[in-house]
Image (tube, rainbow, N blue to C red):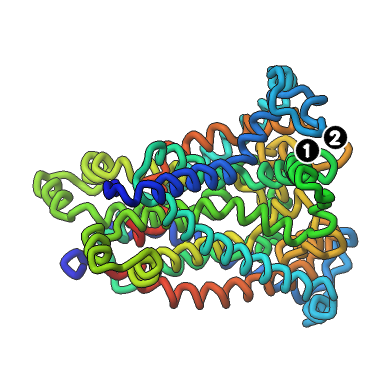
Amino acid sequence: MANKKPNRAPARTLRIIASWIVALVIFFPILWMVLTSFKSELDAFSMPPHFLFSPTLENYKEILARANYLHYAWNSIVTAGGATILGMLVAVPAAYAFAYHPTRRTKDVLLWMLSTKMLPGVGVLVPIYLISRDLNMLDSKTALVIIFALINLPIMVWMIYTYFRDIPYDILEAARMDGAGTWQTMFRVLIPVSRGGLASTALLCLILSWNEAFWSLNLTTASAAPLTALVASFSSPEGLFWAKLSAVSTLACAPILVLGWLSQRQLVRGLTFGAVK
Amino acid sequence: MNARVRKRPERLLAQPAIIMLLLWMIVPLAMTLYFSTQYYNLLYPGKSAFVGLENFAYFFNYPSFWTSILNTIVLVGSVLVVTVVGGIGISVLVDETFPGQGIVRMLLISPFFIMPTVSALVWKNLLMNPVSGFLAWVWKLFGATPVNWFADWPLLSVITVVSWEWLPFAILIFVTALQSLDREQLEAARMDGARGWAIFRYLTLPHLARPIAVVVMVEAIFLLNVFAEIFVTTNGGPGDATTNVPFLVYTQALLEFDVGAASAGGLVAVVLANIMAIFLIRLIGKSLTER
């Protein structure tokens, strides 16, 4: 696909340079955050900015020494992980039913599910807040797990449905002929065949739950607060600890960033419900 | 499709998902509807009373309410324009293979995976700070006076941060879509003497119609709910300059504890979202389920 015509070479070089510049500009805030996390507070605040500095792990040491970082990180892992597991447990059977045993209303049901995703959080914030309060579930990880699973469920059902639809029914039928029941067919045939799609669906749910801020900021205070809330607590103007803020941010974002990089191709298909290939 | 229609109990497997989403939608909405007709303040429990449409009247006469609607529309609209136009431009730019293309794409899509609270704080403190932010230094480099972004251009600053977060999503989708553009057709067009702009206008752009629709739909869902970025950077201010509908409802509910008014505001947000949803699903829903 590379253009080999020699007369287009200068244009091509220009284009490559432009691509790199645009990419670096867009990535710059993240790069700057990571660089700042290795600076001393003095260097972080200095003007003009220091591009060359002696890197220090001081900020990371201090962040990790405060046990509360691990507390927030653990909350993020439990809520995002729990929501992903709960979501998959509900979404996989639903997608199976929609893909292989559709009714006349299946399409409408699928579109309706998508429309619940458009229900703005603020529209239901007050009742959810009051229900959580009355159930003594304010600031509880369980509440976040359920909410994260519910807000991601429509997208998960859609994604998995898209993947299942591409698997020929004959494969399932063959398993059935061999005497496999519904659950056997699902676990022995369908799930192994669509492993990649299921993995990227779970990954997307994990990413969205990990980064979710509206519900975690409004429903948690301390004991169940995930990393999004910890990072937000740095927004108070009193604490200008930029190097430490950068270190916390880097630690909070790194795992998801790496996961995102690894799975970008599959994510596209899922995010667009298979409408873009 | 019809060959697949089989009456089997497997259909029941969809029930848990349907019931959970139904509850998630109906219970809170019914409660919101009920609260919106009540005087109900968490600070004065036991004083609740039916007030009819008073909460709506309060909201509609509240100057910040109209500002928040306007801010929501401006925010969603500008970010959509920036990300779609920018996304198309950048995807076309990086479409042809070149050394390091994989790395360039990784860098381009990275902001999408950064949590909103982090991107808001990084932009506010490390980049847009008027004293020691990176942009202040760039401004001084060119002899200009550094801008106090979030104080002087609050909404523009929020739009910048949110656009930065969502531009990668558009790029991700468009880059993938461009890969399925028929290369032979492209070469044939070039042979026939079609040049850059004509190819873009008559080949690339029509090919991107559906991806553009998908980007607009997915982004609209998330952009109507922008909250963390505002919460962390401006807290809705200065004044109500960056207060959007989600943020206004949040201030009513969790800062002023006025459940009645917040519910009325929440319902307005739901109506607003549904107008967009109906419009978008009409536009795109068909092409998503049919092939």
Q: Residue at x 16, y 44 (%)?
A: A180
Crowding at label 2, few (<14), some or many (≥20) Cα neighbours within 10 Å? few
Q: Position of residue A107 (x, y in %)?
A: 35, 70
Which image quadrant is residue A72 in? top right
Q: Are marks 1 and 2 in contact (CB under 8 Å)?
A: yes
Few, some or many residues within 10 Å of mark 1 (<14, 14–19, 20+): many
Taking the spot 46% from the left edge, 73% from the top edge, the residue there is: B281
Give above or below for A196 relative to B202.
above
Left or right for A193, reference B127 = left
Q: Position of residue B143 (x, y in %)?
A: 81, 47
Residue closest to the eye, A126 or B220:
B220
Q: Which residue is mark 1?
A: A234
What is the chain letter for disc 2? A
Instruction: Using the image, name the chain to which the residue with label 1 belongs.
Output: A
Answer above or below: position of B19 versus A132: below
Left or right of A185 on screen, residue A267: right
Q: Farthest residue to the front: give it.
A: A7
The reply to whether residue A47 is in sight is: yes
Regarding mark 2 in the picture, which secondary structure is present there? loop
Hey, which quadrant is residue B29 in on the image?
bottom right
Labelled disc at residue A239: 2
Q: How far is disc 1 from disc 2 in space, using C-alphas? A: 7 Å
Judged left or right of residue B165, residue A219 is: right
Residue drawn where x is 39% and y is 71% of the image? B201
User: Closest to the observer: A223 or B106?
Assistant: B106
Residue B174, picture quadrant: bottom left
Q: Secondary structure at mark 1?
A: helix
Disc assigned to residue B148 = none
Q: Residue at x 38, y 51 (%)?
A: B95
Q: Mark 2 or mark 1, which is nearer the start of the sequence?
A: 1
Residue A263, given in percent of the width and then of the height, sits at 41, 40
Type of the residue with mark 2:
Gly
